[in-house]
Image (cartoon, coloured by chain):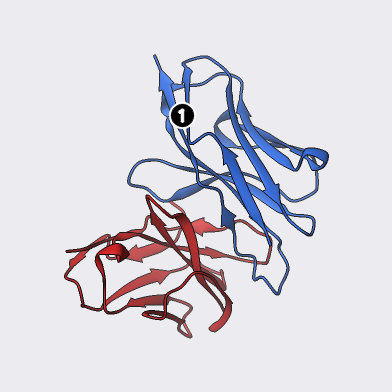
Chain colours: A red, B blue
């Protein structure tokens, strides 16, 4: 058990809809990272938050947004969903810079 | 910019044989390097990490990796494969710089199959 909790585990929704994925980091970790895993793109870094502030941005679409709350949990919001957004979305957390990332079990999003 | 290249998207070995998964990295500063394993329907689990303390790094489940700066490589090995090693393996690099936030850049992954 990595200590990182992601909910829900599975999500099925229709095109054009909006969903919210939730992540609770390991106790004590201030950084939260979001990754998207798909067969054609592999593991793509989306965005990172550190203690409530955005720290780094990757290949995140404008339709996607995220935030980290004062209790350090994070949410990834995906809107105007398209079929191509179907993927596994992972959250990870870490302590100090350079330390390993600890991953949750992911949320599998299916857009129909 | 950082990048990671994993040579071979699929590797198949017999049980008891040597496992060698190849990883080459590109980084403008001394990197932090990691290997992760992903079992079906699970998240990524850390196998081992290199953070400049020693070039030969030992990880969990009998895996180890050697950092070779001259070859910009960080190959993963295990002397004797077990059926339970069948999974997907990811090499990742981080610059560890505060401006980058410590994010990891992953390779495309190598799927390891172990034949009885």
Is B45 in front, or is B97?
A: B97
> To which quarter of the image does residue A106 belong?
bottom left
Residue B91 shows in this picture: yes
Which residue occupies 58% across, 19% down?
B18
Closer to the camera, B68 or A62?
A62
**In x, y percent, where is residue A18?**
25, 79
Residue B102 placement (x, y as % from top left): 64, 65
Q: Is residue B60 left or right of residue B110?
A: right
Horizontal side of residue A32 vs B5, given as left or right? left
| B52 and B62: which is toward the camera | B52
Q: How many marks?
A: 1
Residue sitting nearer the eye, B3 or B101: B3
Residue at image x 16%, y 70%?
A14
Q: What residue is disc 1 on?
A: B85
Above or below, B52 relative to B23: below
Residue A51 visible in the snapshot? no
Q: Position of residue A85 (x, y in %)?
A: 31, 65
């Amino acid at each position: 058990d990595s200590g990182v909790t992601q909910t829900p585990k599975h999500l099925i929704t229709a095109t054009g809809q909006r969903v919210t994925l939730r992540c609770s980091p390991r106790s004590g970790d201030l950084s939260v990272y979001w990754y998207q895993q798909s067969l054609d793109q592999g593991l793509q870094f989306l965005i990172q938050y550190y203690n409530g502030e955005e720290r780094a941005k990757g290949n995140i679409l404008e339709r996607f947004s995220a935030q980290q709350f004062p209790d350090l949990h994070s949410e990834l919001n995906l809107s105007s969903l398209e079929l191509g957004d179907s993927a596994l979305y992972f959250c990870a957390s870490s302590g100090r810079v350079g330390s390993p990332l600890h991953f949750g079990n992911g949320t599998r999003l299916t857009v129909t | 910019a950082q990048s990671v290249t994993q040579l071979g998207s699929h590797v198949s070995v017999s049980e008891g044989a040597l496992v060698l998964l190849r990883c080459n990295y590109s980084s403008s500063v001394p990197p932090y390097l990691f290997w992760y394993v992903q079992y079906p329907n699970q998240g990524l689990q850390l196998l081992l990490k290199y953070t400049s303390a020693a070039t030969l790094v030992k990880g969990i489940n009998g895996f180890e990796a050697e950092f070779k700066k001259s070859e910009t490589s960080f190959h993963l090995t295990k002397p004797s494969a077990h059926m339970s090693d069948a999974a997907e393996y990811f090499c990742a690099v981080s610059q560890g710089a505060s401006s980058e936030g410590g994010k990891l850049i992953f390779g495309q992954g190598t799927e390891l199959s172990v034949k009885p």
